[in-house]
Image: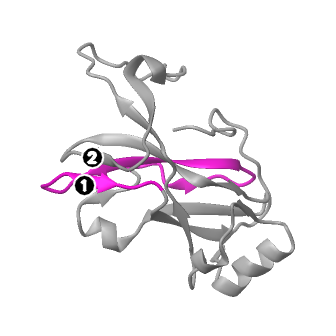
């Protein structure tokens, strides 16, 4: 398995094997692609009963609500909120990826994923970001900002993700 370079990423995009919609070639770096934040956020409700973690599906609507912002969302210290990328990412069965934060925001305490950074092969969806403010002050996060990057890897063999979040379009 090898991380794709800028030139390899551009070849995959040119031949249509890798799709990013909308695509901005200026967002392709030496070994990653910057992805931007949409206007949709999933904000947690004040829930006093425990949320039981089991193998069955969790009712996210019972513990959170979907909101849309025009200007920005203020993420308080210690708060977690789900965002989602503006771009839809379509990977072939031979590529997988990793979502990573950008150092300019990490230096302020923003984590863009808590533990779920792996992007499965064969997905065609927008990427949910489990954002947390680990810093000491509120952070205003703006839609349209290049909030994270994806690092792509070629796989040995082929596989396709068919799990619960394969068609996600909202956080």
Which residue is identified by label 2? 75
> Which corner quadrant holds the N terminus?
bottom right
Whole-percent x, y for residue 12 in the image = 79, 74
Q: Are marks 1 and 2 in contact (CB under 8 Å)?
A: yes
Corner quadrant of residue 151: bottom right
Q: Quick one: label 2, few (<14), some, or many (20+) residues within 10 Å?
A: many
Q: Residue at x 54, y 22 (%)?
A: 57
Which residue is identified by label 1? 139
Whole-percent x, y for residue 82 in the image = 42, 41
Q: How is the image coloured?
A: one colour
Q: Residue at x 34, y 19 (%)?
A: 51
Q: Residue at x 74, y 59 (%)?
A: 91
Whole-percent x, y for residue 157 in the image = 79, 62
Span of residues in magenta: 114-143
Q: Quick one: label 1, few (<14), some, or many (20+) residues within 10 Å?
A: some
Corner quadrant of residue 137: bottom left
Foreground of the two, 40 or 162:
40
Q: Give the secondary structure at mark 2.
A: strand
**69 up-or-down from 85: above or below:** above
**130 up-or-down from 10: above or below:** above
**64 up-or-down from 159: above or below:** above
Along the horizontal axis of the image, is 86 left or right of 74? right
**Lower sequence index among marks 1 and 2:** 2
Q: Is residue 122 magenta?
A: yes
């Amino acid at each position: 398995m090898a991380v794709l370079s800028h030139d390899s990423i551009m070849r995959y995009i040119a031949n249509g094997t890798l799709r990013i919609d909308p695509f901005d070639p200026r967002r392709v770096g030496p070994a990653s692609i910057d992805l931007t934040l949409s206007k949709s956020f999933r904000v947690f409700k004040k829930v006093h009963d425990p949320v039981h973690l089991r193998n069955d599906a969790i009712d996210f609507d019972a513990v959170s609500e979907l909101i849309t912002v025009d200007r920005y969302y203020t993420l308080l210290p210690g708060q977690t909120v789900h965002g989602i990328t503006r771009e839809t990412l379509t990977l072939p069965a031979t590529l997988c990826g990793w979502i990573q934060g950008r150092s300019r925001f990490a230096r302020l305490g923003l984590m863009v994923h808590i533990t779920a950074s792996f992007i499965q092969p064969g997905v065609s969806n927008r990427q949910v970001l489990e954002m947390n403010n680990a810093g000491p002050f509120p952070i205003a996060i703006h839609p349209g900002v290049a909030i994270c990057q994806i690092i792509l890897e070629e796989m040995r063999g082929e596989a396709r993700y068919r799990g619960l979040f394969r068609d996600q379009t909202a956080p």
